[in-house]
């Protein structure tokens, strides 16, 4: 019996070696079982993509296309686009400034869709008992914000509007969580931040808005993709945008219920989410040539302010429909 088992093992070993040799000689054989597999790696922040992930509708829709989904949460746009540049994600959502810095760094991104403008959803806040009444009063003060984010562009526009220079304030580059801590312990004089963080600090600490983006910036959200992924997987990206459109329409029509859902997802008090929703404009729109022209203006402003090391040509990131 032992000799019989030994003979069987030898036959199986020889067969396995033969299969391995055949696979080495014909690489296509080795890949046949996985050749059709596709994955959409999504990077997301606190926003509609959070709800889309929780509901699972995108996963179900993409499964019919043979596409699986992975999700990675980011605290802000700049690290999201660093991940894209490193090849770690394929699709995500950011504000209006991070794509400019990513393009300057050579990231292979394309704008795929956009949200309506929401300039009031980002603002400069100070402590409720601060003597600061206007942005110009922040001359010589410490201002916290995320470098390379939408609030970075708002800072530049606020400086221009107040006829101040970069040297007139001290930017303190911090993530949202670190900036909140600095704001609470008074180690910074002001914080430039977006919703829902803006709404939370207003409600939890009585933070007072001294200026928002109205009349200065559009503050749109952008859905981006890697150029290579967009070229090869338009069906998966279109499915993602379709599901996002449905979620945003639902949020627009059901703001109270949406606030309750987001409160649970984000671990943020429902009244703060409701406040953020009062400023929000929900929807998904196609990227237009006007969009690209606006993004080019942002790039030019950053370059002229000495923030970017070189000029950026936004047209290189045009979506396939406009390329």
Image: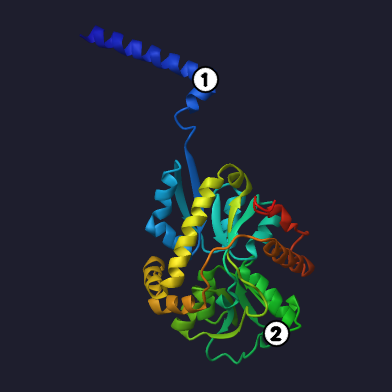
Mark 2 vs 1, N-terminal side: 1
Q: CA distance from mark 2 to mark 1?
A: 68 Å
Tell me, for residue 139, which label it has, or none: 2
Q: Position of residue 46 (x, y in %)?
A: 48, 65
Q: Position of residue 111 (x, y in %)?
A: 63, 56
> Do residues under tags 2 and 1 come within 8 Å of each other at their CB atoms?
no
Q: Nearer the viewer, residue 129 or 89?
A: 89
Tell me, for residue 222, which label it has, or none: none
Q: Regarding mark 1 in the picture, which secondary structure is present there?
A: helix
Residue 188 falls in which quadrant of the image?
Answer: bottom right
Single out the residue that lies furthest toward the left. 1
Location of residue 64 with respect to 294 vertically, above or below = above
Instruction: Quarter of the image for the N terminus: give it.
Output: top left
**Dot 2 surroundings within 10 Å: few (below 14), some, or many (20 or more)?**
some
Q: Which residue does the image show at 64% across and 72% down from the upper left?
A: 218
Location of residue 96 with respect to 211 vertically, above or below = above
Q: Nearer the viewer, residue 120 or 163?
A: 120
Q: Which residue does the image show at 66% across and 74% down from the upper left?
A: 217
Q: Which residue does the image show at 42% across and 45% down from the upper left?
A: 63
Q: Regarding mark 2 in the picture, which secondary structure is present there?
A: loop
In this rendering, which labeled residue sits more in front, label 2 or label 1?
1
Q: Position of residue 161 (x, y in %)?
A: 73, 82
Left or right: residue 322 compared with residue 240 = right
Tell me, for residue 24, which label it has, or none: 1
């Amino acid at each position: 019996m032992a000799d019989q088992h030994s003979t069987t093992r030898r036959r199986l070993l020889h067969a396995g070696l033969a299969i391995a040799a055949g696979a080495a000689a014909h690489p296509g054989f080795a890949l046949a079982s996985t050749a059709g597999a596709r994955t959409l790696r999504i990077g997301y922040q606190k926003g509609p993509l959070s709800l889309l992930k929780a509901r699972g509708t995108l996963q179900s829709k993409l499964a019919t296309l043979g596409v699986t989904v992975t999700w990675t949460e980011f605290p802000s746009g700049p690290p999201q686009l660093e991940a894209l540049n490193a090849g770690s994600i394929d699709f995500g959502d950011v504000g209006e400034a991070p794509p400019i810095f990513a393009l300057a760094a050579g990231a292979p991104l394309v704008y795929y869709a956009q949200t309506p403008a929401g300039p009031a959803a980002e603002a400069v806040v100070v402590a409720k008992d601060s003597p600061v009444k206007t942005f110009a009063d922040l001359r010589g003060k410490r201002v916290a914000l995320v470098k390379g984010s939408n609030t970075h562009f708002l800072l530049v526009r606020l400086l221009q509007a107040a006829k101040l220079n970069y040297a007139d304030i001290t930017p303190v580059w911090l993530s949202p969580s670190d900036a909140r801590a600095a704001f609470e312990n008074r180690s910074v004089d002001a914080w430039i931040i977006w919703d829902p963080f803006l709404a939370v600090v207003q409600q939890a600490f009585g933070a007072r808005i001294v200026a928002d983006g109205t009349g200065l910036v559009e503050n749109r959200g952008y859905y981006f993709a890697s150029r290579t992924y967009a070229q090869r997987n338009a069906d998966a990206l279109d499915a993602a945008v379709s599901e996002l459109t449905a979620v945003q329409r639902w949020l627009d029509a059901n703001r109270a219920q949406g606030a309750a859902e987001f409160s649970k997802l984000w671990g943020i008090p429902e009244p703060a989410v409701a406040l953020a929703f009062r400023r929000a404009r929900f929807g998904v729109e196609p990227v237009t040539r006007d969009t690209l022209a606006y993004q080019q203006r942002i790039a030019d402003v950053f370059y002229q302010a000495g923030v970017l090391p070189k000029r950026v040509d936004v047209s290189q990131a045009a979506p396939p429909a406009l390329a």
